[in-house]
Amino acid sequence: MNFSTFKLKPEIIRAIDQLGYKEATRIQEKAIPQLLANNIDIIGLAQTGTGKTAAYGLPLIQLIDFNSKHPQGLILCPTRELCLQITSDLKLFARHVPNARITAVYGGADIRDQISLIKKGAQVIVATPGRLLDLVKRKAIKLGSIAFAVLDEADEMLNMGFQEDIDDILERTPSGKRTWLFSATMPGAAVKIADTYMNHPVTITAGSRNKIAENISHDCYIAKEKDRYVALKRMIDYIPDIFGLIFCRTRLETQAVADKLMKDGYNAEPLHGDLSQMQRNQVMKKFRDKTLQLLVATDVAARGLDVDDITHVINYRLPDESERYTHRSGRTARAGKSGVSIVLVNTREVRRVKELESQSGIRFEVKKIPSGRAVCEKQLSAMMDRLATTQVDNKEIDSYLPPVLESLSALSKEELIRRFVSAEFNRFLDYYRGAEDINVKVKKRPTKGEKAEHRLAGNVQRFFINVGRLDKLKEGAIVRLVCDTAGISSKKLGRIELKREFSFFDVDKRVANKVLKSLKGVTLDGRKINAKFAAKAKRANPY
């Protein structure tokens, strides 16, 4: 769908054309008409990188009265980087709108400068919760004229502990305002905010709720803990043209990994909360300009990192929650492009990968860490490709060639190639000479379901049931439902597979008809259960 179909003002359409926007994304297609035409509250759910800022930003620019100097639009977001990114985007959308003033307020910058900008008459304020409350308590910002409140990356704000701040801020805004909540996932705390502060919100979902983008492949590499950094280097070296983001869990680890990579000659820098705002801005600018190849970051620091063409996200450490993995992997494959998300785990963390698969509904492909020879071959091939595609300015270079040709005249073509390759390639050859295989074999441990299936000796009937993870269903609830309703022992129950909107479970064939009959007309948490026989599925395990 083209943006001209949304009935946006000509000055906004002009800005969109200058930005090169052609077709609206799915969240934009669904949200923009609703926000423009209806006086309603909206919950917008879409994966990271699908254009949520424009989905709410374009209607906001259209609806704000920029002839007034009072703040009418308030956008709350979790981090300084995202605050600055949103502000930059909104200013671009409003570049041809007369009198438009959009101001960012966030911690780590001079509060006096921010107060000065607000006093000049900012109609839209983009803020992190803590700094906004500070300004409100100093009476530098009054929220009584707010007509539109936007919660961007609501799930992450709640993960970062901003629940009380958000409550405090929203309570100070008019009850008649319109509230727009945009998020990649919808945790319970966000539902509570919607129930408390939103008036019969309409939910718009672009893609599946809490779903990871389909154009991302997910790879898993397993190494011993002592080989974690060595494995990271091999993966980077095996991808010569990588433009990547490496996630660590702590500031100390982020700095340590970045320091090691820089010492080893990689174009890498850290991004974490201990850096000054000026340092963070410098690093972010280099990464956006693509003069920095590898950014090593914490989850918090990387929020708001809206950079196109990131080829790989590497999880040096797994996050604690599946939602964080969703956000991490969403840094790649933006604007419909494809990308790769890599997790690096030790042998004890393999179970966490399986949990992540179950919680997120994704499947990791377990791959072997490349051998030293494979890395060298890949690097050599990439070097030859660059050589073959190098543009030559014959007119410029010809005057320099005679002495070069004379000094190399004694070398044959083959010898010349050998020396050229060696001059460019010796670093890799020296480092990977005699490199060991650091892959580890993980002994597969049977799951509870596999143990039960073995106990039943394959004599099972598979059931389909119309509830799943979206219904907050747990395996224990199925066990209780089946066993209590049918009056059978849990030993008669086999494998249980929870899907997003439905589930499967196996029971001993000898009691299958009894279970089917007992589940007719049964409800679970108020929802009518539909259970029926299902075909036995073939199962593959990658571990």
Image: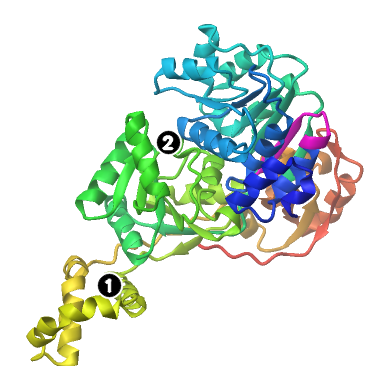
Q: How far is disc 1 from disc 2 in space, using C-alphas?
A: 34 Å
Q: Tell which of 333 and 3 is nearer to you.
A: 3
Amino acid type, callout 2 = Ala
Q: Position of residue 208 (x, y in %)?
A: 70, 48
Q: Which residues are magenta?
A: 35-46
Instruction: Say if mark 1 contacts mark 2, CB within 8 Å.
Output: no
Left or right of 439: which side holds 396? left
Q: Would you place residue 20 above or below residue 525 in this image?
A: below
Circle 1 sits on which residue?
Answer: 376
- Give the image location of residue 332, x and y in percent: 51, 53
Q: How many marks?
A: 2
Residue that numbered label 2 is attached to: 301
Crowding at dot 2, Cα within 10 Å, few <14 / some 14-19 / many 20+, comes out as: many
On the picture, is 1 further left or further right than 388? Answer: right
Q: Is residue 212 visible?
A: no
Observer-nearest residue: 327 or 91?
A: 91
Q: In the rendering, at what x and y percent does residue 249 appear?
A: 39, 38
Q: In the rendered view, does 124 fall on the left or right side of 420?
A: right
Q: Residue at x 44, y 22 (%)?
A: 107
Going by the numbered disc 1, the residue's amino acid type is Cys
Q: Is residue 44 magenta?
A: yes
